[in-house]
């Protein structure tokens, strides 16, 4: 793991709780001067001690008490950053928190950059890069499923999953290099069949992990779902039923919805932006409806998944067929709504729903998740959740493909090793073992200040 530059020993400070007023606010100080900077701001009943919580009073320059606080001292290396860390918890008045930060700055601290506490944890070897990214994902989680995935990443699930493949790759590289370095000592050269078998095993492990990206990306980022169809097919009723509240206006008059309406919900623990749209028809009545239809087509184009609602009590129309044809090659599902009003169900490819009774909604949700994510990995398995991670794995697989082709052609091991080293470098980038400052700056700049 990369280590912090020993010359970079400044002490940083930031407010670690959200902006605004709250019951509790936390100011975090990290660095070699953390205790020396924090102590003059506090009237302590007992001196700070590692791993101990102390009651204190916050005092100004004249010694006047401003607030009571709970102070915790984490001694290096047993802290989040692996440096000395002091956390001051007081009432969440912005003026108090601002005073603490300014007092720390006056005593030699520097204001922390976004994500700098976590960046220091990474640079000190406290976290690998996948764990550092998971900190931000956990903070940004909107659903429990997102939190579970981020917590698994923070616990090192991804690094643990890739470790066997990486160890096998290192072993293969070592054996081939030994065969080259000690050829004059009659060391047995690894046969091509054994090399190919080893590469195949390593590549299969990496490909299995890379295949979780489809599900992991959706869990992390969520998706947009647009409900479309002819006027009065029951789109808004279905929209309300999925939300489990009356959000869209529903009347017997066609064309009630003119502008798209969007709301957030969770399906299977995945955040979804659900969009209700104006009814589609070839001959709109007036300019307002025409503009609404145009916005519906825009929503269709931008959505990750489209639900086409067809009135089950009416024959399928040319407009229905035109809408379905326009979605060819994209994820969509035809829903025949108002199924509670009919007896026969002739279309096996559609999902039959009733916004009145709720019939078919569970089946619809399952079909949406299946179409977008495929088969979800087993519980507690590691997931690839962002493009950077997926690209690193894809580069490793591509390098192994090249090395496999070289081994089949019996190309000298010196050339084969070039691609094996490229695969290892790609895996190192996954966890941050060989990261550039530019990549690190981009990743940690997305964090909030104080984390």
Image: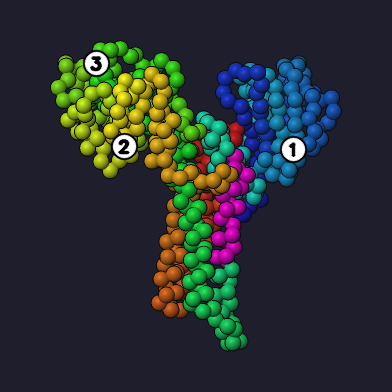
**In the image, residue 33 lies at what x, y percent?**
72, 38
Residue at 54 percent across and 57 percent down: it is 428
Q: Which comes before the other along the chain, label 3 or label 2?
A: 3
Q: Single out the mark in the foreground, 2 or 1.
A: 2
Most common SS among magenta residues:
helix
Name above or below for residue 441 compared with residue 60: below
Q: Which residue is mark 1?
A: 74
Q: CA distance from mark 3 to mark 1?
A: 65 Å
Depth check, front residue: 347 or 368:
347
Residue 116: image quadrant is top right
Say which mark, if any, is on residue 348. 2
Name above or below for residue 391 compared with residue 451: below
Residue at 49 percent across and 67 percent down: it is 199
Q: CA distance from mark 2 to mark 1?
A: 62 Å
Which quadrant: the C terminus?
A: top right
Judged left or right of residue 314, residue 175 is right
Query: Which class describes the residues within 10 Å of circle 3: few (<14), some (14-19), or many (20+)?
Result: some
Depth check, front residue: 433 or 373:
373
Q: Which residues are magenta?
A: 150-170
Q: CA distance from mark 3 to mark 2?
A: 27 Å
Q: Single out the mark in the foreground, 3 or 1.
A: 3
Q: Secondary structure at mark 1?
A: strand
Q: Is residue 160 magenta?
A: yes
Residue 87: image quadrant is top right
Q: Is residue 443 magenta?
A: no
Q: Which comes before the other along the chain, label 3 or label 1?
A: 1
Residue at 41 percent across and 71 percent down: it is 405
Q: Which residue is mark 3?
A: 254
């Amino acid at each position: 793991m990369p280590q912090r530059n020993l010359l970079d020993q400044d002490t940083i400070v930031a407010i670690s709780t959200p902006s605004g007023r709250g019951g509790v606010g936390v100011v975090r100080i990290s660095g070699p001067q953390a205790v020396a900077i924090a102590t003059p701001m506090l009237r302590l009943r007992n001196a700070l001690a590692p791993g101990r919580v102390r009651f204190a009073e916050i005092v100004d320059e004249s010694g006047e008490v401003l607030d009571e606080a709970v102070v915790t001292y984490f001694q290096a290396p047993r802290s989040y950053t692996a440096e000395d860390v002091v956390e001051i918890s007081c009432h969440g008045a912005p003026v108090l928190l601002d005073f603490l930060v300014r007092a720390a700055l006056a005593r030699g601290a520097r204001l922390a950059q976004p994500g700098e506490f976590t960046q220091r944890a990474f640079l000190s070897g406290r976290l690998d890069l996948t764990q550092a990214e998971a900190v931000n994902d956990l903070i940004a989680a909107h659903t429990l499923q997102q939190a579970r995935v981020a917590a698994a990443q923070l616990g090192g699930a991804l690094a643990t999953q890739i470790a066997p493949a990486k160890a096998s790759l290192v072993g293969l590289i070592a054996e081939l290099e030994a065969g080259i370095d000690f050829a004059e000592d009659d060391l047995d050269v690894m046969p091509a069949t054994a090399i190919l078998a080893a590469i195949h095993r390593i590549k299969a492990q990496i490909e299995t992990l890379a295949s979780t990206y489809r599900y992991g990306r959706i869990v992390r980022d969520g998706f947009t779902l647009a409900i479309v169809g002819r006027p009065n097919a029951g789109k808004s009723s279905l929209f309300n039923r999925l939300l489990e509240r009356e959000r869209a206006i529903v009347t017997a008059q066609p064309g009630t919805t003119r502008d798209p309406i969007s709301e957030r919900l969770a399906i299977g623990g995945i955040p979804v932006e659900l969009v209700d749209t104006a009814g589609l028809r070839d001959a709109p009545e007036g300019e307002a409806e025409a503009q609404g239809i145009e916005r519906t087509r825009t929503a269709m184009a931008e959505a990750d998944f489209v639900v086409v609602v067809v009135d089950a009590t009416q024959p399928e129309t040319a407009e229905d067929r035109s809408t379905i044809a326009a979605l060819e090659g994209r994820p969509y599902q035809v829903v025949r709504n108002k199924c509670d009003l009919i007896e026969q169900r002739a279309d096996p490819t559609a999902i039959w729903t009733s916004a009145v009774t709720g019939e078919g909604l569970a089946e619809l949700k399952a079909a949406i998740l299946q179409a977008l994510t495929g088969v979800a990995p087993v519980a507690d398995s590691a997931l690839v959740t962002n493009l950077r991670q997926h690209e690193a794995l894809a580069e490793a697989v591509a390098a192994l493909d090249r090395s496999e082709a070289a081994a089949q052609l019996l190309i000298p091991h010196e050339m084969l090793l070039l691609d094996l080293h490229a695969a290892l470098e790609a895996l190192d980038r996954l966890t941050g073992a060989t990261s550039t400052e530019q990549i690190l700056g981009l990743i940690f700049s997305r964090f909030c200040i104080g984390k």
